[in-house]
Amino acid sequence: MDILHLSTSDIDNGGARAAYRLHDGLRSIGCTSKMLVHSKFSSDSTVIVERSPLTKLSPPISGIPLRLYPKLNSPMFSPQWFPDVLAKRVRQFNPDIVHVHWVCNGYLQIETLAKFSQPLVMTLHDMWPFTGGCHYTQECQKYQDSCGDCPQLQSGRSSDISRWVWQRKAKSWQNANLTIVATTSWMADCARSSSLFKNRRIEVIPLGLDTEKYKPINRQIARQLLNLPQDKQIVLFGAITSTSEPRKGFQLLIPALQRLAASGWADRIELVVFGSSKPEKAIELAFNTHYLGRFNDDLSLALIYSAADVMVVPSVQEAFGQTASEAISCGTPVVAFHGTGLKDIVDHQQNGYLATPFAVDDLAKGIAWVLEDGERLQKLQFQARQKSLREFASDVQASRYLSLYKEIQAEITA
């Protein structure tokens, strides 16, 4: 089985790492797998960079239409209008399946999907594939119809860019041999309720990871290497741009920590934050805080997760939540809100705690519940690791995708 993955990059962000992990997992079970990317950050020879002049021009030019919307209040909105050469490149590779991952930032034009002759599999790393351009809808439900009058664009017009992007997807993709894969049941439900994918085949396959890289490391050693205190319980929070992206929920974690401090935990907990550097203007977090900065390598991340007693992932919207799956693979329980993709990772009071969305008091209660009983914490740690081995191991994910690829091929030849 010959698979070609299309992804804007390979390992520099969550969606890219997820695509690369699947690519690597498929190769480990005997598939021929390659990645074609706009930007490469690994040294893997099976990841190929598309170096055409159009590809180099696309990132700065692709956002030009958004200049018509000076009130745009979202950091991520992708019209994907700029031409590309990917149809020609895919013909040169001639794979059995084209697997489309996160292909925004101008990498792949919406209309290009219809030019591929191979069956297409698309993994939903965010909500962009079934919206009019936004990557997360916030509270908007217009993707269930035909977008327009987009609240993120603050356009005030039904015939805005979001309607144009939606119409282009509807027209270009209607006859494509396209199978959708959601990484969680929440994302699958969103896709099924969308006007673009409501009649598509939608499967659910969780993201995978290397459970031999993400595994428990002796907590004392991990803390020693990271220069963290041995005599405190450590609460961990982290993501790319972890403290500045509202979707990640840092603004909800702050009052939860303040409630914890006020209820008797002030001298027992310290906070560790990764994905962001220490802010110039101090944030009142109620606890001594260690800012570790950004990490991309698996060993450093496994050390960070293993050093913590609990990981808090207070996201408001999350397609999956790889920091949560990485944490439980390292035997660290996770506290999150009961909603979006995280509810597929965290089993309430089994490997963590699912708080009422988006109740700060219950988030604080969940952190305390995980930490207050040492024997219970050990059980949570064990059950976290077991779920990772059972559901998120890379060979498990790769085998599920290989079965799906074979089913799709069988339908063509039947």
Image: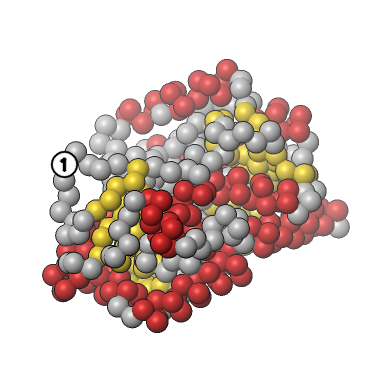
Q: How many numbered marks, from 0 up?
A: 1
As drawn, is 88 to the left or to the right of 255? right
Neighbour class for label 1 at 10 Å: few (<14), some, many (≥20)?
Answer: few
Q: Camera-side residue: 86 or 79? A: 86
As drawn, is 107 to the left or to the right of 380? right
Q: Residue at x 17, y 64 (%)?
A: 258
> In this rendering, is residue 98 above or below 358?
above
Question: Which quadrant of the figure has residue 335?
Answer: bottom left
Q: Which residue is mark 1?
A: 281
Residue 379 appears in the picture as rendered: yes
> In this rendering, is residue 27 above or below 316?
above
Question: Which quadrant of the figure has residue 144?
Answer: bottom left
User: What kind of residue is marked 1?
Assistant: Lys
Quarter in which the C terminus is drawn: bottom right
Q: Residue at x 54, y 41 (%)?
A: 11
For the rendered model, the colour scheme is secondary structure
Where is residue 146 shown, x and y percent of the image? Answer: 44, 49
Where is residue 93 shown, x and y percent of the image? Answer: 76, 33
Q: Camera-side residue: 157 or 264? A: 264
Q: Residue at x 46, y 51 (%)?
A: 301
Secondary-structure class at tag 1: loop
> In this rendering, is residue 214 above or below 111?
below
